[in-house]
Amino acid sequence: MIRVSFLCLLLLGLSLQAASPVYVVLWFDTEDYIEPASDDAALRIASDLTAAGVRATFKVVGEKARVLESRGRRDVIEALSQHAIGYHSNWHSVHPTPAEYLVRLGYLEGAQEFERREGPGVADVRRVFGTQPVCYGQPGSSWGPQSNPALRRLGILVYLDEGDQVGLDEQPFWYGGLLHVFHMGRNTFRAQLNVGAEDTAAYQRFDETAARLRSSGGGVISIYYHPNEFVTTEFWDAVNFAHGANPPRDLWVKPRRRTAEDSERCYGVLRRFVAHMKSQPDVRFVTARDLPGLYENPLPRPADRKAIAEHLSSHVIFQDVQGQMLSPADMLLALLGVEPAIVDGPTAAGATTWSEPAIPAPAFQNATADAADFVRRAHRLPSEVFIGAQTLSLPDFAATLAGSVLNPAAQVPVIRGRIEFDRYFATDPRRPFNWVIHPPGFSAAPLLDLGRLQGWTLKPARLSR
Ligand SMILES: [Zn+2]
């Protein structure tokens, strides 16, 4: 009897462990359109990985796709096409970069401008590679939240990059309707290219990280390089576009090259690192194309309105409600009776001008119907909701609505909403945007403010079981 129980526990333990996979997303920002040796580097890396049975994600810059085409590099295009193809902006470091052109635009006009500037690059990558790019990541730290609605319109639903502007417990998250692999903290690192024939410290770090993730239900490790790093000792853009410089094309200079032997050594470092990762148990290499399929659908099933109201009346932040992870936007839609949908957050902070402690129920019902109509038509949350000529800010409206679901009454008490998702966003307007390409002192507080408003859509992504 005891033996049987032990066996059961053992089998249970094994099955739990088998259900805790470690996914490695290996990605390459394929961006250098100035030094042609970078084309060969991309070819070599893609071919080595294909030979090793590993699939990676190559995020390609629009101009890089165009020069591969004009240089007749079908070999590079075909080698990269064995892997997932993403998008890494149209011009990368030619000014204005995304954060530069987005910083003084609001949410909606910024999204339009992103689509105007980046849409043609997406189309070129699609045309040259014959496939729709599956992910986007900003050049350098040139981030702006207006990219999210634009990317959805461009058919790109995964955000794969690194940065400090927003992050959630070092694992993938849903934000602005896109699955983000971003700000991965301890779960992003690499084998250093400049330490010799191999970087054994990275192997140890990988093993420790994989063990930690396995013991906590599984997760993602994000590892990235640039093909140009394998053939040059300087970045192609830093030698041309640093600190806001924008020389014309005929003045572009090439970065310093590695020797052929040194490049060979670098390819070896990556090859050995990949072989080490691949040899570990329960480790799977996945691409940006695979990622959405690994996670639960972000659109929630119908949930109990009282359970949602219980949470939203006192906390405006994502929450597990009856086994489903819901963003504040998911919760608000449920309380409004709007069918589950991907929506954006508000475009402005909004203000509460209603000064009485309660609102007559008929007036509040009108306001609620109006808010629901706004969400259905605009596919975003209103910044404020009108009660006659007065307003409730979105947080105050959401908390008040939640309170009215819990305790229906002839006078609906106004409840102040408590935003609690701000801690997942950077506050320093300079440091997260510190990139050698941006002008000195580049500061982007408005992008962080807009990004924080979109925290209504933020929630952890959960691996499917
Ligand atoms: Zn880049």
Image (cartoon, grey):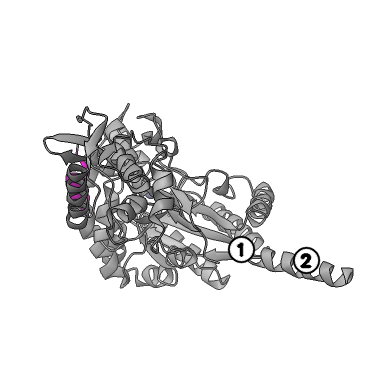
Mark 1 is surrounded, within 10 Å at the Cα level, by few (under 14), some (14 to 19) or many (20 or more) other residues, namely many
Name the residue rendered at 26%, 69% in the picture.
127
Q: Position of residue 148 (x, y in %)?
A: 30, 52
Main secondary structure of the magenta stretch: helix
Residue at mark 2 = 9
Residue 18 falls in image quadrant: bottom right
Left or right: 78, with 105 as reference point: right
Q: Is residue 32 visible?
A: no
The disc, 1 or 2, on the residue closer to the chain's N-terminal end is: 2
Q: Which span of residues is magenta-colored?
A: 105-115
* Mark toward the viewer: 1 or 2: 2
Q: Are marks 1 and 2 in contact (CB under 8 Å)?
A: no
Per the model, the C-alpha gap separating discs 1 and 2 is: 20 Å
Task: Judge whether residue 108 is colored magenta.
Answer: yes
Residue at mark 1 = 21
Front one among 59 and 419:
419
